[in-house]
Amino acid sequence: MARPKSRRSAGAPMLRRTVADLRALAHPLRLRMMELFAESPKTTKQVADLLGQPPTRLYHHVAALERAGLLVLKEKRQNRGAIEKWYVGVAQQVEGVPGRGGNAASRRNARRAVAATVLEQAKQELLSMPAGAKEAALLTRLVVATPPSRIPAIRKRLLDIVQTMRGELQVDDRADSPAADRERWALTLAFAPVRSPGRSKNR
């Protein structure tokens, strides 16, 4: 089965993929790795340094993400007698769309696992904001009541906003801009129907 072409830009990975791909991301460390690789091409060591992890802990995760087609080898470079491998994420955001492969229950469980991982990551980032931070975190929730026919347009508008921000804020870690001049902020966007308690939870 053909894979989507790779695109280089910042953000979390977009999934229009198989159940196996979804499961590959249902891991907090792999999700953070994919977010960093999706910003711009990086080496495993660079990602390990950003995450405060030893590179040896990340190698098997990189191999798993590469096998799933979520990471691709962008280039190889010689550096002091060693070969550096630069990887890039193939896509940029998690979308709540049906995965391919497996039965309906396995697809649903895989999507839920990824959603739980993403939302838990967002929760930890919000709760870890230091007191008196120069810029406060932004947390908002809006519930709208609208005809179903308008939902696709609203969804597209939200995705367009994210795509625009991604293009404007794209970074390149191979450039000369020092990493000390940057702060990483995360945007987690969820747009889903509000289910009343009496409705089925298995939809």
Image: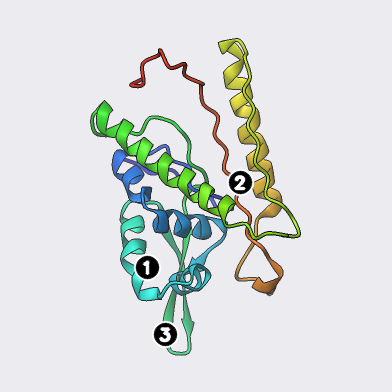
Residue 107 in picture, x, y percent from top left: 30, 33
Residue 108 in picture, x, y percent from top left: 32, 31
Left or right, residue 51 beside residue 179: left
Which dot marks residue 58?
1
For disc 3, the marked residue is 82
The front one of 5 and 33 is 33
Which element type, helix, strand or loop, lies under badge 2? loop
Circle 1 packing at 10 Å, graded few (<14), some (14-19), many (20+), is some
User: Could you tell me if the residues under marks 1 and 3 are in contact, i.e. CB atoms within 8 Å?
Assistant: no
Residue 182 in picture, x, y percent from top left: 68, 66
The front one of 161 and 190 is 190
Q: Residue at x 68, y 45 (%)?
A: 138
Real-space Cα separation, disc 1 to disc 3, in angstroms: 18 Å
Q: Is residue 74 above or below residue 90?
A: below
Which dot marks residue 187?
2
Image depth: mark 2 or mark 1 in front: 2
